[in-house]
Image (tube, rainbow, N blue to C red):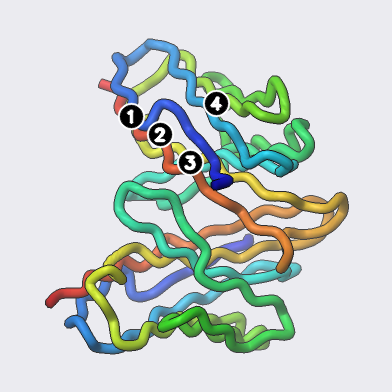
Amino acid sequence: DARVTQTPRHKVTEMGQEVTMRCQPILGHNTVFWYRQTMMQGLELLAYFRNRAPLDDSGMPKDRFSAEMPDATLATLKIQPSEPRDSAVYFCASGLVLDGQPMGLDTEAFFGQGTRLTVV
Amino acid sequence: KNQVEQSPQSLIILEGKNCTLQCNYTVSPFSNLRWYKQDTGRGPVSLTIMTFSENTKSNGRYTATLDADTKQSSLHITASQLSDSASYICVVSASGGYNKLIFGAGTRLAVHP
């Protein structure tokens, strides 16, 4: 059963600590998204990778957030130092997109279960 | 600016009743529009996806419509069930160069017995 796997599911940490969230995209997918969801803002795009290369990370606070794909089976989102306003659910999604093509009928963004982060 | 707006923000209906959720967008150039269902504590799951040339798509009791001229979409739920209680999110994909999904804020639906 192919699915996007995110770890941890829940994380509580103190302000100032480093947080690392991990995502295993569906095998064979070449596109990975990181989203943040809060009650106030809904879903916000943080970063977007195609074939492990970052294409858009304009939604991320650069001073504290970083996103990487060390290999095709792992995407990471780090926050250092964390702040209470970072408390949210962080979703990873993956899909298969042909080069130069938009996400169309034959592509789909599959979401993980999310990591619920609480910074106290 | 690419935007997706949904209404109503929240909705309460009785089990068995029908309801319609609205989505207006200003995304250009338009690629496709999706409706996602998000249960509490879960990631969004796709219900329907429509391209420019399609104006209706059904998935069981869910029927989505798209008017590309007025840039409006609706999601109609027929004979609602308690399990339909969730947030319904309209997502528009922009094309050109690279692409990304633009999310609406969602409509929170509660179906009561």
Task: Report whether mark 3 lies on the same chain as mark 4.
Answer: yes
Q: Residues within 10 Å of mark 4 (few under 14, many from 20)?
A: some
Q: Is residue A85 visible?
A: no
Local secondary structure at mark 2: strand
Distance CA(mark 4)–CA(mark 1): 14 Å
The percent position of residue A50, horizontal first and vertical second, equals: 76, 40
Check the image and name the residue furthest to the right: A100
Does residue B102 appear to the left or right of B51 in the view shown? left
Q: Residues within 10 Å of mark 1 (few under 14, many from 20)?
A: few
Q: The numbered mark 3 sits on a residue in which chain? A: A
Q: Which mark is residue A91?
A: 3
**Residue kind at label 4, given as amino acid type:** Leu
**Residue kind at label 2, given as amino acid type:** Thr
Q: Is residue A8 above or below residue A108?
A: above
Name the residue beneath numbered marker 4: A77
Q: Is residue A49 above or below residue A77?
A: below
Task: Report whether mark 4 lies on the same chain as mark 1.
Answer: yes
Q: Is residue A27 above or below residue B103?
A: above
Task: Report whether mark 3 lies on the same chain as mark 1.
Answer: yes
Distance CA(mark 4)–CA(mark 2): 11 Å
Q: Is residue A56 above or below residue A8?
A: below
Distance CA(mark 1)–CA(mark 2): 5 Å
